[in-house]
Amino acid sequence: MRTVVRRKSFILAACAVASCALVGCGSDDSVDEHPAGHTGDHTTSAAAAPSVSAQEPAQLVFAVADGRKTSGPDMVEVQRGAVVVLEVTSDQADELHLHGYDQTAELQPGVPGKLEFKADIPGTFELELHSTDAVLTQVRVAG
C-alpha cells in the first residue's frame, strides 16, 4: 500500500512540476516589431539590468581595454522617453555605434566618448565597437 501511495505522490509531484514548466514556457502570441539592430530579449535577466525611468536622465559608464569591455552593465533597461547618456572610455581609438538609433561616436584613447539619445524607439538595441564588433551592452527600451 505504501508503494502505491509513494508512486501516486511522485506522479502528482511530477505532473505539478511539468505543469509549472509548461506555463512558464508558454508562447506569447503577440507580435512585437522592431527596427533594424534589434536583438533577442532573452540574453540577460531583467533583475540584473539597471533601470532608467523617463523622468531622470541617466549616464551609464563603460570602460574598454584591448577592444573588450572591462566594466559596465550587460543590459540596460529604460522607459520610453528617457534621456540616456552612454559614456565609454577606451584605451584605443575606435567608433562606438548604437544600433537602431544609428548613433555613433568617435573614441580616442583615454578620452570618454559619449552618446546621448532619447529612448523613443521600443525594442532591444546593441551598443558596439566597430573595430572588434564587441557588444558593450544591450539597451532595452520598454514600449
Image (spheres, rainbow, N blue to C red):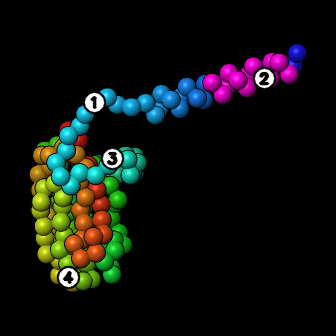
The alpha-carbon separation of the residues under discs 2 and 1 comes to 40 Å
Q: Is residue 125 above or below residue 6?
A: below
Please state the extent of the stretch shown in magenta in the rendering. 3-15
Q: Is residue 86 visible?
A: yes
Circle 3/circle 4 CB separation < 8 Å: no
Q: Magenta: predominant secondary structure element?
A: helix
Which residue is the extreme one toward the top?
A: 1
What's the residue type where badge 2 is placed? Arg
Q: Nearer the viewer, mark 4 or mark 1?
A: 1
Q: Residues within 10 Å of mark 3 (few under 14, many from 20)?
A: some
Where residue 140 appears, x then y in whole percent?
26, 49
Q: Is residue 22 above or below residue 83?
A: above
Comes first in the chain, label 4 or label 1: 1
For the C terminus, the image quarter is top left
SS at mark 2?
helix
Q: Residues within 10 Å of mark 1 (few under 14, many from 20)?
A: few
> Going 34% across and 60% down the picture, which residue do you hit?
73
Residue at label 4? 93
Where residue 84 appears, x then y in whole percent?
17, 55
What's the residue type where badge 1 is placed? Ser
What numbered label is drawn on residue 99? none
Q: Is residue 10 magenta?
A: yes
Q: Is residue 41 above or below residue 84?
A: above
Comes first in the chain, label 2 or label 4: 2
Residue at label 2? 7
Q: Residues within 10 Å of mark 4 (few under 14, many from 20)?
A: some
What numbered label is drawn on residue 41? 3
What numbered label is drawn on residue 30? 1
> Going 34% across and 31% down the picture, which residue do you hit?
28
